[in-house]
Amino acid sequence: MMASDVLNKLKWTGKLKGCEIVIRHRGAESDEKTISGSDVTEVKKSYFLYRNGKETFIPMHRILEVRAGGKVIWRKLQHKNVKKRD
């Protein structure tokens, strides 16, 4: 299952507002940023939009994991030569 499938399922079941999306964000602490699902305004196959004062475009390949209820429900597969996330 791809990240877009997970976000769309959460959107259409009304659970997107309660989730967190962790993305790769160069320059942020640990190069990661957590976005609240309640800030997501649109979900498409290759990207999603969220508002943080303005609408921001995030490509799906930047998503590292999706959490709901404090549990990881989706995590990006890692290549063998990439350090695993804690």
Image (cartoon, rainbow, N blue to C red):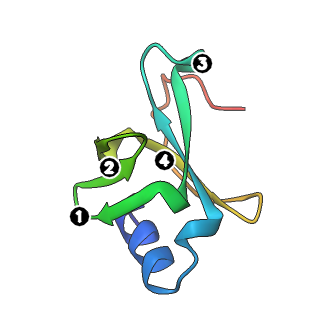
> What's the distance in space between the residues labelled 3 and 1, CA to CA?
27 Å
Circle 3 sits on which residue?
Answer: 30
Q: Earlier in the sequence, mark 4 or mark 3?
A: 3
Q: Circles 2 and 4: CB distance less than 8 Å?
A: no
Residue 55, x across and y down, in percent: 30, 46
Circle 4 sits on which residue?
Answer: 76
> What's the distance in space between the residues labelled 1 and 4, CA to CA?
16 Å
Going by the image, does 50 lie left or right of 10? left
Q: Amino acid at mark 3?
A: Ser
Q: Secondary structure at mark 2?
A: helix
Q: Is residue 65 above or below residue 83?
A: below
Q: Circles 4 and 3: CB distance less than 8 Å?
A: no
Residue appearing at x 38%, y 71% in the figure: 5
> What's the distance in space between the residues labelled 2 and 3, CA to CA?
19 Å
| Quarter of the image with the N terminus in it | bottom left
The image quarter containing residue 11 is bottom left
Residue 45 is labelled as 1
Q: Earlier in the sequence, mark 2 or mark 3?
A: 3
> What's the distance in space between the residues labelled 1 and 2, CA to CA?
8 Å
Q: Earlier in the sequence, mark 3 or mark 1?
A: 3
Q: Secondary structure at mark 1?
A: loop
